[in-house]
Image (cartoon, coloured by chain):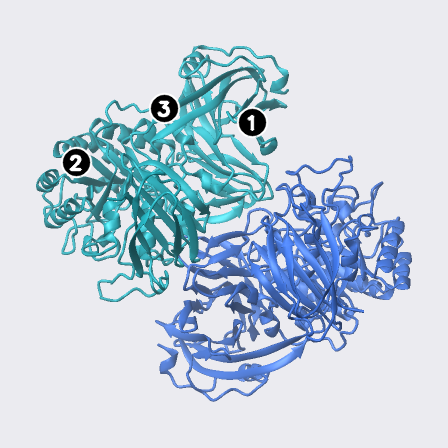
Chain colours: A cyan, B blue
């Protein structure tokens, strides 16, 4: 039976009515049941039943984009919600509103969508009911399940979410695997494959189609539900299915009714350049629950960090312990003297001296090492107006962290510490549940809420992926969840390849910011033994100019200057890091090709300054960049940090050419990028 | 202990002496033990021991290409040949000779290499000995083990070959997986990943380095040994290790001494365009054992085949049985009338009427279906001078095939049938051994030898991969072993993507020819119900001109015109298929980028004609092709089959523009390829 053939009637129950009340506008008149189009009319989603199964499909410009794809649940201890389903009614709404972000890649966000709510019920006993809610924006689709409170369905135990994505074309996917036997996290290099050969992969999954639009499959508003992966059959099919991160007993989710699932999202764009800045997930998250966000501040930061990764310092106590009082005071003074907003200190707290990996109970989050005077350091930070960033490595000791966090965060609050970098260096959490299971998602939300109560901003490493939480909790600043700079310090594969960040921009960075930690200028770094790195050893595979460009390209509201501060002292490139903005009014992707290059221009928030970042893979490239985004009547000065003559990521990564020139909106700049290079430009009003 | 620190002495034993005698020149004077360079001096291989382990490494232009990589064996029922090893001596040879192929991509092949034989022995009991033989060519390296007959080592049971490939750079690999839980064959679309994330992949494995040369890892002279896969750890390492296809008990190989393993090969080129034509594997195979090769003839062929794949005909008996006497006579007449060399007939023999997959004992290779008069058909083929190609689907029934093959091949010989297309549609062979195990390799060699005795040329589908057998047995014409045209008929992923063949050229086609079966012109094919294919249904994702270009790009000595012959009747594009050569004097890759495009020029053997084939992925491209390869004093006519105005693989694949123009060696042709398109050019002497 097809939804189109049925008449439309009001759905059932108080749960539905309450949810409907959240909508900004009243449901539209009932028409064309089962189908809903984007405001621009290009994208049409249809929900329908076939042989008692529930399916959705997506058409774009009249051609199929997603073929009929199953919806439903496999349940434990109850019949699956899969067969014998019928559509009991539909309901519609439209929203067009603009809201402002407290910080972000763009200041204002337009939420313009049409919504269809489809009431589904079993045609025979037990006659259970649920809803599918579809929101269609010009830039993509969100789809979620709502399971109301109803007789005989007080709780569901979800074995699998049956949501499918049956792509009409065998697009090329940029992917990292999930469910790896070892190191089941997200810090991996990307592969590119046709959808039809994928096994189990992580989202966001970016799909480049040979003939159609580009798509990003992901999720939004992930609360009290496991993270979604995507799984394929690897045998000549274009269908991926939702694969939820499991708990140790194989159960994916346990929920009492009523509940709603995260949104399954498909962002759609004609060109890869149109994927960023991405606001689809933000629009699918609830507005901020924080009344006062004035204490939340994007910033650059330096930190006691890189020395440990390159092996000249240690987290634990001893002769090369890095987090000492004196060293921290030195970092605080450096930050204050250079307008750097914060100082991260890793290894300050007791717990690092044994085998701490996956043994998180060893950590105290309040007790400092004897050579680290927390009170004195915090007082100096307050005095110098620098944000001290506390590091909380949990190593997966969730109970240990949760038992301490309220008092620890209160201590930090009392000391003026308003930011935490947390860490979860584990593959499974205690109990054996997945690092991405419902349990873990719950934990992260508890931490985030507690942090908000104590006025603390979060930067989470080894996190669950970004699903737009920052709209609701604007203290959720940034996170890792991909392969960052530290792999250039020690990775057995030699470090991130030159193309790496050009892929990250179109994959990991789509849903939200990443704490990549750019800005290591000592590229041919000297080891403790005084030896320069050989080419095949772990090292940074970019030029210096590309390290600077990453500040503009890889968005993060906390943006680290990751090198040892002694490598910044007197370095002419540091001037760019000192002056680059971290909060943006608007963002424009000028050029882009996944795995090849990215050119981005961003206007600083509450400022007339613009910044341009351009990066390339191992190929040298030239870009003609028209500055027509500048005010037509403005005169500007461009401070240009370019690859110098002969610069090359292999053997001349330090060649840097810094210049200044007068520019205006009629200027076209020719950006010449070396192999593995980049260019960073600050454009400030003249005079 | 390092090989360089030891004096050089003659190795041991009669086995070694016998093998040495095979070398074309006497061993060079003993010097620089453990190291051997290519004739051009650019590539240097070093074999040495470290802490009792045996390692090789490869440097290119003074920089590391392969870091120290382990050599040895894990054995069953005996200590591993891995530790406590020392180098007992070395021996050298150099070869520079040119030999002629009976057919091929090039007529003459130069074998110019330096060889190092390293004698290895255990320093303590049992004191076993083996050799590592390295041959270094300008275009790559071959490396094999030789295990001599020796006291206490009459047989070895190999659990694993420990050969490693520790790449100095984390290159990008173009790969298909091995060891898949289902469909463990080679008919898959390619992925691209950094080496460091690979799990288990097939060879040939083509590696594009961001900073160095391109490499292809493969093997040569695979006899009585399992096929080699490559396996990685997926965790930030650049080392792949040999992973041999197993027998059901996990044993990889059982061999009596003396024996030698296949060569492990690393082809090396500065540019991808220099990878083809590849002769490394040919040079590492023994010369032909066939005295008379005059009966071996490359050819184009048509066949009773595509109708089954698109569902309008059947292999088995019944109303749509394709392999009838009348239909075959029709195909034979068509071939004879059009200068097409052969006619393949599938479904002629008894066995197709039940569930034959992995149930190969059902097949007879001599008994025809009642509606197929084998004698009459064969007589007509002889009369019309057309080669009848017998189809032998074994479905993995190795014993059934081997028990029949001598008499079947004798029958074919008596009927003038001189070619077989065989098939092995199975994932494991009877007994549970891998489809690529030592047992299977042995089977293929037995079939090939039997065929040679009966004057029969082989075209093997679902084969073990090509390791250069055609040098020794020039009746080993072509094989499948990759995803061919038939996937465009029925594959659930919609068919081969436009980039597919541009990848095949630089991967699957490197070691040898492939029976891809191009030339389907009815691209928007009509189904039995009269309906044109929708875009997301299985269909051919190229233009007509690209189908023609594949005859030049994808080398095969048996080159099928795969469409139903009624689709060729009166089609202007068929003239190119009628006239294209299938045997070549020389081959030049003019342009190439893996996954993007290929432009190839080939000179026909014993002819003054040249052919140019150009193909592209989903991007339209223009190539300027200078015809400076033509004779400087010659006048030629170019017959050009180009994408027509508005041609596009999505919605205008049939647009074809055929033209003729006078050309000479000063001409530059501008080849305009449509998205998903191609161009095919025949250049013949004028007049």
Q: Chain of mark 3?
A: A
Instruction: Give the residue pinned by disc 1.
Output: A44
Marks 2 and 1, how far apart at CA: 49 Å
Q: CA distance from mark 1 to mark 3?
A: 24 Å
Name the one closer to the observer, B642 or A128.
B642
Label 2 vs 1, first from the N-terminus: 1
Query: Upstream in the sequence, badge 3 or badge 2?
Result: 3
Q: Is residue A294 left or right of residue A155?
A: left
- CA neighbours of label 3 inside 10 A, class few (<14), some (14 to 19), many (20+): some
Report the residue at 37% width, 28% height from top: A223
To which quarter of the image does residue B18 belong? Answer: bottom right
Tag 1 secondary structure: strand
- Residue A417 is labelled as 2
| Mark 1 or mark 3: whose residue is earlier in sequence | 1
Q: Nearer the viewer, residue B168 or A178?
A: B168
Q: Residue B416 in the image: state x and y as whole percent.
A: 85, 65
Residue B335, percent from left and from top: 84, 58
Question: Does residue B167 sit above or below A375 in this rendering?
Answer: below
Tell which subunit mark 1 falls on: A
Mark 1 vs mark 3: tell me if same chain: yes
**Residue B430 locus on image (x, y percent):** 65, 53
| Left or right of residue A597: residue A480 | left
User: Where B561 falls versus B477 (above or below)?
Assistant: above
Q: Are marks 1 and 3 in contact (CB under 8 Å)?
A: no
In the depicted view, which residue is nearer to us: B301 or B19? B301
- As helix, strand or loop, the secondary structure at mark 3 comes to loop
In this view of the protein, can residue B186 be seen by the observer?
A: no
> What number is the disc on residue A286?
3
Q: Position of residue B353 (x, y in %)?
A: 78, 44
């Amino acid at each position: 039976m097809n939804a189109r053939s049925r008449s439309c009637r009001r759905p059932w129950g108080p749960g539905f009515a309450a949810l409907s009340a959240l909508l900004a506008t009243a449901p539209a008149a009932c028409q064309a049941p089962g189908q809903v189009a984007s405001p621009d009319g290009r994208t049409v989603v249809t929900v329908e039943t076939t042989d008692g199964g529930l399916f959705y499909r997506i058409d774009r410009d009249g051609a199929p984009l997603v073929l009929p794809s199953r919806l439903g649940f496999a349940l434990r201890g109850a019949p699956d919600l899969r067969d014998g389903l019928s559509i009991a009614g539909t309901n519609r709404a439209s929203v067009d509103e603009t809201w402002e972000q407290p910080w972000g890649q763009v200041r204002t966000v337009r939420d313009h969508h049409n919504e269809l709510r489809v009431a589904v019920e079993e045609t025979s006993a037990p006659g259970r009911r649920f809803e599918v809610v579809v929101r269609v924006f010009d830039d993509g689709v969100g789809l979620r399940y709502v399971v109301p409170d109803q007789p005989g369905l007080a709780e569901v135990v979800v074995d699998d979410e049956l949501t499918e994505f049956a792509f009409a074309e065998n697009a090329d996917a940029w992917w990292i695997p999930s469910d790896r036997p070892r190191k089941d996290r997200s810090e991996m290099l990307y592969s590119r494959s046709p959808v039809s050969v994928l096994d189990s992969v992580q989202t966001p999954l970016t799909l480049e189609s040979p003939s159609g639009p580009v798509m990003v499959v992901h999720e939004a508003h992930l609360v009290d539900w496991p993270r979604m992966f995507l799984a394929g059959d690897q045998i000549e099919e274009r269908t991926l299915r939702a694969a939820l991160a499991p708990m140790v007993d194989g159960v994916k989710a346990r929920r009492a009714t009523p509940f709603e699932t995260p949104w399954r999202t498909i962002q759609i764009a004609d060109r890869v350049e149109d994927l960023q800045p991405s606001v689809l997930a933000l629009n699918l998250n609830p507005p901020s629950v924080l009344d006062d966000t004035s204490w939340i501040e994007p910033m650059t930061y330096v930190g006691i960090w890189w020395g440990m990764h390159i092996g000249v310092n240690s987290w634990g106590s001893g002769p090369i312990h890095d987090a000492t009082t004196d060293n921290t005071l030195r970092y605080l003074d450096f930050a204050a003297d250079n307008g750097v907003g914060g100082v991260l200190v890793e290894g300050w707290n007791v717990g690092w001296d044994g085998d701490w990996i996956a043994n998180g109970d060893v950590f105290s989050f309040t007790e400092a090492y004897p050579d680290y005077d927390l009170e004195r350091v915090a007082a100096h930070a307050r005095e110098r107006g620098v944000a001290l960033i506390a590091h909380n490595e949990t190593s997966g000791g969730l109970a240990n962290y949760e038992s301490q966090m309220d008092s620890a965060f209160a201590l930090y609050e009392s000391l003026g510490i308003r930011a935490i970098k947390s860490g979860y260096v584990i593959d499974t959490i205690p109990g054996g549940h997945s690092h991405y299971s419902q349990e873990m998602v719950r934990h992260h939300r508890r931490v985030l809420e507690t942090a908000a109560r104590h006025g603390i901003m979060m930067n989470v490493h080894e996190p669950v992926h970004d699903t737009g939480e920052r709209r609701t909790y604007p203290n959720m600043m940034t996170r890792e969840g991909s392969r960052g700079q530290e792999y250039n310090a020690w990775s057995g594969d030699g470090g991130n390849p030159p193309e790496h960040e050009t892929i990250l921009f179109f994959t990991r960075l789509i849903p939200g910011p990443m704490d990549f930690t750019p800005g290591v200028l000592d590229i041919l770094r000297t080891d403790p033994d005084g030896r320069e790195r050989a080419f095949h050893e772990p090292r940074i595979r970019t030029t210096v100019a590309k390290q600077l460009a990453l500040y503009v390209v890889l968005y993060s509201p906390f943006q680290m200057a990751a090198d040892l501060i002694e490598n910044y002292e007197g370095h002419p490139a540091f001037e760019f890091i000192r002056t680059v903005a971290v909060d943006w009014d608007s963002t424009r992707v000028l050029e882009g090709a996944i795995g090849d290059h990215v050119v981005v221009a961003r206007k600083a928030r509450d400022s007339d300054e613009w910044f341009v970042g351009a990066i390339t893979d191992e190929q040298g490239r030239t870009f003609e960049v028209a500055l027509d985004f500048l005010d037509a009547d403005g005169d500007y000065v461009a401070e240009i940090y370019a690859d110098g003559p002969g610069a090359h990521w292999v053997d001349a990564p330090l060649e840097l050419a810094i210049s200044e020139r007068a520019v205006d909106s009629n200027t076209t700049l020719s950006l010449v990028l070396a192999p593995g290079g980049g260019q960073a430009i600050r454009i400030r009003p003249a005079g």
